[in-house]
Amino acid sequence: MRSVSIIGAGCTKFGERWDVSLRDMIAEAGVMAIGDAEITGEQIDALYVGNMSGGRFIEQEHIGALIADCAGLSRLHLPSTRVEAACASGGLALRQAVLAVASGYSDIVIAAGVEKMTDVSSGTAADALASAADREWECFFGATFPALYAMIAKLHMRRYGTTNEQMAQVAVKNHHHACMNPIAQYHMEITVDDVFKSPMVADPLHILDCSPISDGAAALVLAPTDMARSFSEDPIKIIGCAQASDTLALHDRRDLTTLDATVHAGRAAFAQAGIEPRAVDVAEVHDCFTIAEILAIEDLGFVEKGQGGKAIGEGTTALGGPLPINTSGGLKACGHPVGATGIKQAYEIVLQLRGKAGKRQVDEAEIGLAHNVGGSGGTALVHIFSR
Amino acid sequence: MTNQAPRFWRSIPQRYNLSGTHCTCCNEYFFPPRNLCPNCRRGAHMEDYTFKGTGTVITNTTIYNATEDFERLTPYNLAIIQLDEGPKITGQIVSSSANVKIGMRVKAVFRILGKEGDKGIIYYGTKFAPLIEPSCSEKSRR
């Protein structure tokens, strides 16, 4: 297997983008990434795009061919593939691109992600997102996505003493980070009190514990590491790439307060990279709800099981702390266009490792990690990057 | 989610009865039913089994903001219930939310789950009600 590096990265502004279409956004992100890598269309061998539900959100499927077309590459007739793993579709697109390059089958490959979610009502969007859960055995009985994470939160609080305040602090921190990120959906500081006073969605989760509905796109250009320097002055090496699955329904899991898919993908990625979790300098983890960030830092091995809430409370994971988590603002405050999220996470790590993250730069960041989850933990992807 | 009658009228007996399977080799119970035991695989011996319908709340929430189909029910209680035979399932609890607690004993009841307007289809399924005294379970139908 060949070593793989990122030689170009691009990302649109995230948010309610009522002025642009899915086509506009994917073209914008793609052009940024290709420009950053200083390659031409003729050099591209293949494209992979993560998109959860174009069919539900914009009544458009066949996103693979569409993105090649929008990028102006239709006359090159490149293989272009859309992949789907709910909210982990972006991370999965990155992995498919890594496999294509690592295997030697392709040299220059695009990994992209896109979702346009605000063209439908919030009810329709919520129902489309609920299809990431088990439609027949969870949603049929009235489960919503926030409800599933709320039930995880309630059990985590009871077992480990995690508090509402610790969960709220995840949102406060990520909003603070997002204020320093020009592409973030929200540039708005919030307080723990704001979280508590916001409407309850599913007890104990308030609306400010939840990631928003967003539009956005992101793209990366991958190349074999031994070719990377000929394109880019500061290529970022992908030193770990792993994927794991678990039961679709939350109630069938071994333990309701652990995402075993994260545990397995994390262990496999760390083993590949040959490093321990403590070697990571900066991480983007899947905080679709505040409790999810607490689970993620435990299940990835950054803190012991049950200590996630405490770590948040002590500021361990804030910018300036020993392990800054979600410097982009995370899904919570940078926004969560589901198919784009996994690629945006890698984009943020690329900026951090290149030292180009502006006001939110982590000092001397050498190793970064991106963690992307589908559904309530049916899929998890972990990528580890190094300078 | 209108005009989707087949999705709800499709024959799924387990929606209406808690009928699953039991592997007599490893003594594990499955809901919804599995034809192949994940423990014993080809060595399994599976038989049909109807669950007693009693169980315990493992975790729960009250939903204030639902998908379109369930909006008119808000706020409502949702829980993960472990049936006494072992499997865990997700279902609504018909009780005031203040009463629903982790560890609470419940029993399955047959209820309307939703309907599509005044003239649309009605779909039915299992919900759970507080189990006060096991001996009264036959009488406590609402």
Image (cartoon, rainbow, N blue to C red):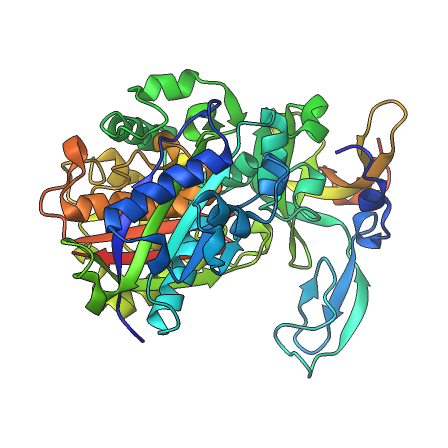
The quarter of the picture where the N terminus of chain A appears is bottom left
Depicted A25 relative to depicted A199: above or below: below
Residue furthest to the right in view is B119
In the picture, residue A356 is in which quadrant?
A: top left
Residue A74: x and y, percent?
49, 51
Residue A168: x and y, percent?
35, 28
Residue A116: x and y, percent?
51, 34
Q: Is residue A305 visible?
A: no
Residue A233 placement, left or right of B96: left
Camera-nearest residue between B97 and A381:
A381
Residue, x 21% and y 43% (percent of image)?
A351
Residue A383 placement, left or right of B20: left
Residue A372 placement, left or right of A66: left
Depicted B92 relative to depicted A238: above or below: above
Camera-nearest residue between A59 and A148:
A59
In the picture, residue B122 is in which quadrant?
A: top right
Residue A137: x and y, percent?
69, 48
Residue furthest to the bottom in view is B43
The quarter of the picture where the C terminus of chain A appears is bottom left
Q: Is residue A206 visible?
A: yes
